[in-house]
Amino acid sequence: MQASRLREAFQGVGRTGSWFVGKFRRIDDVIAFLDEVIDSSRTWEGYRDDQPLPTGMKEVDRMVMYRTTVRIAQRNMRRSGADPDLEHFLRSGVDAADWHEVHAGCKQIAGALAGEIDLEVDAGAMGQASRARAPNTAAGTP
């Protein structure tokens, strides 16, 4: 979703030439790269609780595969996010605080690639919902 917003924001804009380095020559190159990252990180989706149980697989095995494939996808996304050409582009976008659409989009993409996602684990497959929680500083507890 953020990538398509970036594409719209970049239409007809000339101030971004220095943002594109290495394998990226224009915004469509960045978006194609991000699409590949996302597509290659979707293996976990087949093990979600709302998907049919693969033939011969037990529910406990689905849970193990789900957790494993989520961790692999997260590792691959972090690795892709460390690509120097992509890092340069995203840093340029995050630094463009006066260009809200691009700033917000690049910040969100960079955060997602770094693993800064509030991931709600599939409650059915895992047996419980798990969320990262912010520290409760009002109560004086970390």
Image (cartoon, rainbow, N blue to C red):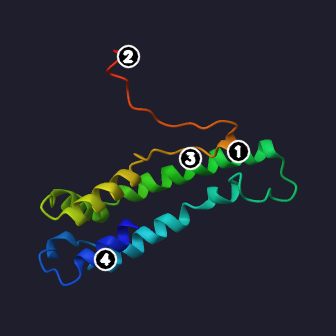
| Quadrant of res 105 | bottom left
> Mark 2 to mark 4: distance in Å?
43 Å
Nearer the observer, disc 2 or disc 4?
A: 2
The label shown at residue 71 is: 3
Q: Position of residue 32 (x, y in %)?
A: 41, 75
Q: Looking at this view, is 44 or 8 the one in front?
A: 8
| Quadrant of res 80 | bottom left
SS for tag 1?
helix
Q: Earlier in the sequence, mark 4 or mark 3?
A: 4
Residue at the (59%, 44%) spot, across then down: 121
> Mark 2 to mark 1: distance in Å?
31 Å
> Mark 3 to mark 1: distance in Å?
15 Å
- Contact check, label 2 and label 4, Cβ < 8 Å: no
* Residue that numbered label 1 is attached to: 125
SS for tag 4?
helix
Q: Looking at this view, is 74 or 117 the one in front?
A: 117
Amino acid beneath label 3: Arg
Q: Earlier in the sequence, mark 2 or mark 1?
A: 1
Residue at the (31%, 77%) spot, across then down: 7
Q: Quadrant of the C terminus?
A: top left
Q: Earlier in the sequence, mark 4 or mark 1?
A: 4
Amino acid beneath label 1: Ala
Q: Position of residue 21 (x, y in %)?
A: 23, 71
Amino acid beneath label 2: Thr
Q: Position of residue 49 (x, y in %)?
A: 71, 51
> Mark 4 to mark 3: distance in Å?
29 Å
Residue at the (53%, 68%) spot, across then down: 39
SS for tag 2?
loop
